[in-house]
Amino acid sequence: MLKIPIYNQKGEEVGTTLLSKEIFEVAVNPDLVYQIVTSQMANRRKRIAHTKGRGEVSGGGKKPWRQKGTGRARVGSNRSPLWRGGGVTFGPTKERVFKKKLNKKMQRKALFMILSSKVKNNLTLIFDKINIEKPKTKILAEIIKNWKLKTKIFSEKGSCLIVLDELKKDVILATKNLSGIKTIQAKDLNALDLLSFKYLIIAKGSLKVIKETFLK
């Protein structure tokens, strides 16, 4: 078991806690992490580009000119890809599927690897609680400022992922106007979000949720 300090919202050390070896002391396999992260990125990708085929563009109906006797090449429709304003051949369409199937065991393993890496590289802070009275950005910004000033781990620069043990709307709303700060519930943790932020800030109650959710 790995012992790590616990801080309060003022940035003061108030105790220690033991981290589960099965989650926070896992050897990193870069190939597995890469595979999971790229798959998650593909699954979040939205289909935007769409070109119209010859069956979707306007026109057609009447044959542009008769089949024989004009000296020109035969044409059946002005919706042909060869014509200006005609359909597009092999263009991108909304029917394209980017999603990739992910093995749950692989996802969990990659998640544990990244969590272990965050702890090993001293990029993880655990707090006894993360609560604010009102959903005000100013209040949360002041709390984060205290963390940066008083904890040796936190530097002035670097994005943060705040892991909540439950849905806390006030905290979530307060982070929306803060650059480089994002909140996520412990049950929704994933490899892609973890790697997208430098520092990992975890509410103490989230440790139990992570264990119950992912250690099955």
Image (cartoon, rainbow, N blue to C red):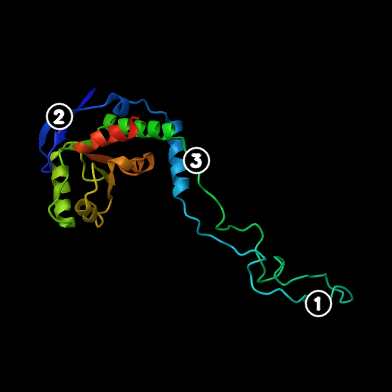
Residue at coordinates 24% horizontally, 46% vertically from top-left?
157
Query: Residue type at mark 2?
Result: Thr
Residue closer to the observer: 5 or 121:
5
Q: Is residue 197 left or right of residue 144?
A: right
Label 1 to label 2, Cα distance in Å?
85 Å
In 3D space, how far apart are the residues under numbered discs 3 and 1 (Cα atoms)?
51 Å
Foreground pick, 17 / 30: 17
Please name the residue shown 11% across and 34% down the image: 13
Residue at image location 31% in from the left, 29% down from the top? 23
Above/below status of 69 relative to 48: below
Which secondary structure, mark 3?
A: loop
In the rendered structure, find residue 101 and report the number of the disc placed on it.
3
Q: Position of residue 47 (x, y in %)?
A: 50, 56
Identify the residue position indicated by label 1 in the image: 65
SS at badge 2? strand
Q: Position of residue 160 (x, y in %)?
A: 26, 45
- Count the labels in the image: 3
Task: Report x, y in % for residue 109.
Answer: 39, 31
The quarter of the displayed image where residue 112 is located: top left
Local crowd size for mark 3, using a 10 Å CA cut-off: few (<14), some (14–19), many (≥20): few
Q: Residues within 10 Å of mark 2 (few under 14, many from 20)?
A: some
Residue type for callout 3: Lys
Residue nearest the viewer, comparing 185 with 70: 185
Q: Which residue is mark 2?
A: 16
Q: Secondary structure at mark 1?
A: loop
